[in-house]
Amino acid sequence: MVALGKRLWAESVGTAWLVFVGCGSAVLDPGGVLQGSGALEMSLAFGLAFATASYVFRETSGAHFNPAVTIGFTVAQRFPVRDLLPYIAAQLVGATLAAAFLVYVASGRPGFEIAASDFAANGFGAHSPADYPLHSALVIEFALSFVFVIACLLVVDRKELAPVAPLVTGACLMLAYLVSIPVTNGAVNPARSTAQALFVGAWALDQLWLFWAAPLSGAVAAGVLFSLMHGNADPSAKLADERGDVA
């Protein structure tokens, strides 16, 4: 089993890559994400970033890069409880550092101001890209987080999919963002949501609770369902659990 320090480093770097590429595709693009090409660009960026980071770090940390995934795997008894909080902390650190770097890069554009920009932050109501209300944001984030986490769990459970697992999970994340961008600007990841909200402040911090509550609830539901369906009958799966594999 890889030492915890190396796994936390991998989770932090992988999450930073995911946030910088995904959010950067929107923040550094002068066009709006409500344009069809903008939404597709952002979705593709998140999906490819997740897939590439998964290929690089899956043997080290399991390639979670998302507190919802870590919690889902813990509930499904595919990840040790003792490593839950350290993983989430590493993901938050990586995401925040990526957001800080993104601020530094974006500030080089004349006229850029975080206060005047949504900075790819997640929101609902007046801060939804298409003005979707709270209940729509809650449902979409819960449902897509549930689907993404259960997909990650099922892919890991099928060892024959190991060579293409990062592509499958990356494609799933891309589709989740493609659907959720008009509603919430695409979240499914509390670390990603927190990092952007910390720099936007004000309304983004006020609405951040939803982007923890909905993804984590979806992840818990996915973990419970997977545990009921599969349990811990396979000894080889138990070894994978200890490694925290995702893709």
Image (spheres, rainbow, N blue to C red):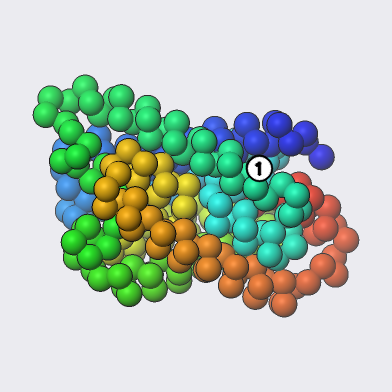
- Residue drawn where x is 37% and y is 30% of the image: 100
Q: Quadrant of residue 69?
A: bottom right
Pointer 1 local density, CA inside 10 Å: few below 14, some 14–19, many at least 20: some
Q: In the rendered view, does 190 fall on the left or right side of 201? A: right
User: Label 1 sits on what residue type?
Assistant: Pro
- Residue drawn where x is 47% and y is 64% of the image: 213
Position of residue 195 measured from the top left corner of the image (x, y, whole percent): 41, 42
**Residue 159 visible at all:** no
Disc 1 on helix, strand or loop? helix
How many tags in the picture? 1
Q: In the rendered view, does 238 fall on the left or right side of 52? A: right
The residue closer to the viewer here, 159 or 227, is 227
Q: Quadrant of residue 105?
A: top left
- Residue drawn where x is 45% and y is 71% of the image: 143
**Residue 235 visible at all:** yes
Q: Is residue 189 above or below residue 105?
A: below
Residue position for label 1: 86
Position of residue 49 measured from the top left corner of the image (x, y, whole percent): 46, 41
- Residue drawn where x is 23% and y is 46% of the image: 118
Q: Quadrant of residue 221?
A: bottom right
